[in-house]
Amino acid sequence: MRAFVILVLLWTAVTGGCTTARPQHATPPPPPPIKPVVSSRPIIDFSKGAGGFPLSSDSLPSTPEALVESLTAGYKARVQVPETVIPVIVAGQNYPRLDALLVDLSDGQIRPAFRPNMFKSAVTLDEALQVKYLHYVARPLRYVDGSTNLRIVAHDVKLGLLRGRGDTAALVMTEAHDGHVQFDVRLDDIRTMLMTSAKNTANRGGYHVNDVQVKLTSADSRSLACELHVSGFWLLLPTSFKITGRIDIDGAQNAHLSNVGCSGEDVGGLIFAGFIDSAIKKYDGRIMPLATFPGGKIKIQDLHIAVDDSLRLDVAFGS
């Protein structure tokens, strides 16, 4: 869940762009009105396998025991699970109809070599399982530089088998009732994760990150604003900049992106901004679906955002 929904836009800016601070005029002309850009591309595309239940093969296991074995192998390739935790449990005597599917990765450690990805090639979706009760928990799921907490509960779930050409398969939710997601991550952990990601990404371009500071605020339960300060050196030149952005979720669960921008805070920051201006400004004013799901039946029904010492998301979904 590293790549969580609300910070995707802002981190794109850190690793890909900011705008140059412009000189002030004595009588600046009024800015032209910004026409919203409506995009059909969602912020998170679950239809391409994001958030799926990974299998170790490209086909549906033929028995409940084989399902447990395949899911366990799929997760253990991604997460180092404590020996005391049984990561996958299934219940039910009428396979592929199950009474319950329980996944527990609590206190697991993401393997350093694992990188989340989605199917890149043509995707096929076939009916697979019916589950009366589905429960996924990872509280916490640890990374090298922080941890997150995630719980997903849903009833009367249909799981489809999603396959990409040349890829292993994943089980994905195509129908569900009374779905509920609870996610939280400490602000200190967000800063540490961004710091690590910035160093790993930016250093390849000759920019060396010294510090990252993050300020998150939520004006109401459906908005999030971020102010991100990044400081470091580009070659031998001090290079610091500030990135801002805001996301507001409307009643149709579309994300409205605004106040997306970046300003240099020293000479190096202004020079650095000149190379990456276009990579961030194209998002300002854009309206995007928050998420799409395989088969198109599941929708986000409600969402609440809160910020205290952690960023907290509470999401209801169903079909």
Image (cartoon, rainbow, N blue to C red):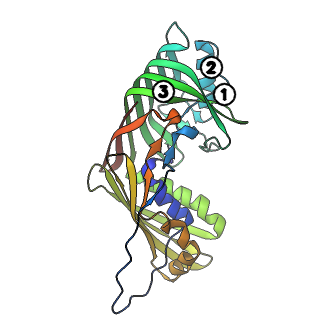
- Residue annotated with mark 2: 69
Q: Label 2, label 3: how many angstroms apart (C-alpha)? A: 14 Å
**Residue sitting at 47 percent across and 81 percent down?**
266
| x and y, in percent, of residue 193 in the image | 49, 53
Towards the viewer: 85 or 36? 36
Q: Is residue 251 above or below residue 275?
A: above
Q: Is residue 273 left or right of residue 60?
A: left
Q: Is residue 64 above or below residue 198?
A: above
| x and y, in percent, of residue 89 in the image | 51, 18
Tag 3: amino acid: Asp
- Residue annotated with mark 1: 56
- Residue annotated with mark 3: 104
Q: Earlier in the sequence, mark 2 or mark 3?
A: 2
Towards the viewer: 186 or 225? 225
Q: Earlier in the sequence, mark 1 or mark 2?
A: 1
**Residue sitting at 56 percent across and 74 percent down?**
233
Q: Nearer the viewer, mark 1 or mark 3?
A: 1
Tag 2: amino acid: Glu
Tag 1: amino acid: Ser
Q: Is residue 195 above or below residue 131?
A: below
| x and y, in percent, of residue 110 in the image | 56, 39
SS under mark 2 = helix
Q: Residues within 10 Å of mark 1 (few under 14, many from 20)?
A: many
How many callouts does the rendering have?
3
CB atoms of marks 1 and 2 within 8 Å: yes
Q: Label 1, label 3: how many angstroms apart (C-alpha)? A: 17 Å
Q: Residues within 10 Å of mark 3 (few under 14, many from 20)?
A: some
**Residue sitting at 50 percent across and 40 percent down?**
142
